[in-house]
Each structure stands twice: as C-alpha cells, then as structure tokens.
C-alpha cells in the first residue's frame, strides 16, 4: 500500500475552500458543482458572476456551459476527422506506391523470362544444326570448324545456367 501523507488526503476533497474544483477530470459533472463559465469572446452572453442571480441566469449559465462543451466536442471531432482523412490519404499513397513497385517487378520478371527463352532458343537451334549435319568421315587434315559457333554455344549454355 502506498505511503499516505497529509497532502494526498487533502487532494481527495472535490472542492477547495473557494468552491472551485480541484480536479479537472470532474468538470462538475460528477460532483454536481457547476462553476459559472463566462464566454468572454461572446458579446451576447448575459451570464453574470454575482451571487444574486435568478433561475433564468442559471439556465443561461448552463446553456453557456453546454455551448462551450458543444464547441469543445466540435473541435475534437473535427480534428479527429482531419486525422482520419490524412490517414486515408497516406494509405492511398502507400497503396499506389505498392502497385507501382509490383508493376515494375512484373515488367522486370517478364523481361528476364524473355531473355531466358531467347537464350534457350539459340541453344536449341545451335544443337539442332550440329545434329542435322551429315556425319562425314574425317580426313587426315581436319577442317577448321568455325570456333565462333562453339564459343557462342558455350556462352549461351553458361548464360542458361545462370538463370
């Protein structure tokens, strides 16, 4: 249990000697204490601070208090609405960026697939050309086979292995 001091015991009371609220959380709603609120910005306000006010001025004070509460709720709700609107716009921007990145990824993948298919087609055509040649008996003097075909085949095969 927490150590109690005289200070914590004094703070438990809802009002001080002047009749004012000690706790801002209460706002007069729980303790039934309604402080006189004067809207100094509003020139049409007829709320008075005198103690000899009648019941009509009490209703004016309550309406002033409720109009202040209404204005506070309006400000809070508008700020929440602006925050939600900004959040929605950020979500839309994130989604647009995600779609753009996905489109770019698909385009790069398509380009890579086309390169792979082109390489495989060149390898297949090179192999089919070698097989279609009639096999001849070799003479003692070997004819120089074009070394460029062999180098091309080897490079295409290596390229194919990379993918």
Image (cartoon, rainbow, N blue to C red):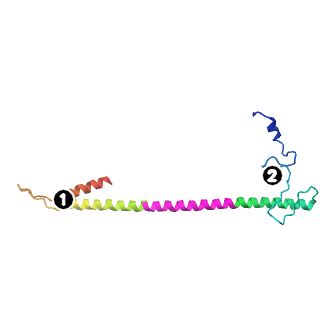
Residue 70 picture quarter = bottom right
Q: Nearer the viewer, residue 33 or 38?
A: 38
The stretch of residues the image draws in magenta is 78-104
Q: Nearer the viewer, residue 161 or 10?
A: 10
* Sooner in the amino-acid sequence: mark 2 or mark 1: 2
- Please state the horizontal and vertical placement of residue 93, each as a whole percent of the image: 54, 62
Q: Nearer the viewer, mark 2 or mark 1?
A: 2
Residue under numbered circle 1: 148
- Please state the horizontal and vertical placement of residue 31, each as a whole percent of the image: 84, 49
Residue sticking out furthest to the left: 140
Residue 48 picture quarter = bottom right
Is the residue 22 above or below the residue 109 in the image?
above
Instruction: Give the prevailing secondary structure in the magenta stretch.
Output: helix
Query: Does the magenta-highlighted stretch encompass residue 86?
Result: yes
Q: Secondary structure at mark 2?
A: loop
- Which quadrant is the C terminus positioned in? bottom left
- Please state the horizontal and vertical placement of residue 103, each as a whole percent of the image: 45, 62
Label at residue 27: 2
- Which quadrant is the N terminus positioned in? top right
């Amino acid at each position: 249990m927490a150590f109690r001091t005289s200070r914590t015991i004094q703070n438990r009371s809802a009002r001080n000697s002047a009749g004012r609220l000690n706790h801002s959380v209460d706002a007069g709603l729980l303790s039934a204490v309604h402080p006189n609120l004067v809207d100094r910005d509003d020139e049409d306000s007829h709320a008075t601070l005198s103690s000899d006010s009648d019941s009509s001025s009490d209703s004016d004070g309550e309406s002033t208090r409720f109009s202040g509460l209404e204005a506070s709720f309006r400000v809070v709700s508008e700020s929440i609405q602006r925050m939600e609107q900004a959040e929605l716009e950020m979500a839309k921007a994130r989604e647009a960026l995600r779609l753009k990145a996905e489109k770019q990824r698909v385009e790069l993948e398509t380009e890579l697939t086309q390169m792979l298919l082109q390489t495989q087609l060149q390898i297949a055509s090179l192999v089919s050309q070698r097989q279609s040649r009639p096999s001849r008996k070799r003479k003692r003097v070997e004819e120089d086979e074009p070394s460029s075909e062999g180098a091309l085949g080897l490079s295409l095969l290596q390229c194919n292995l990379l993918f």
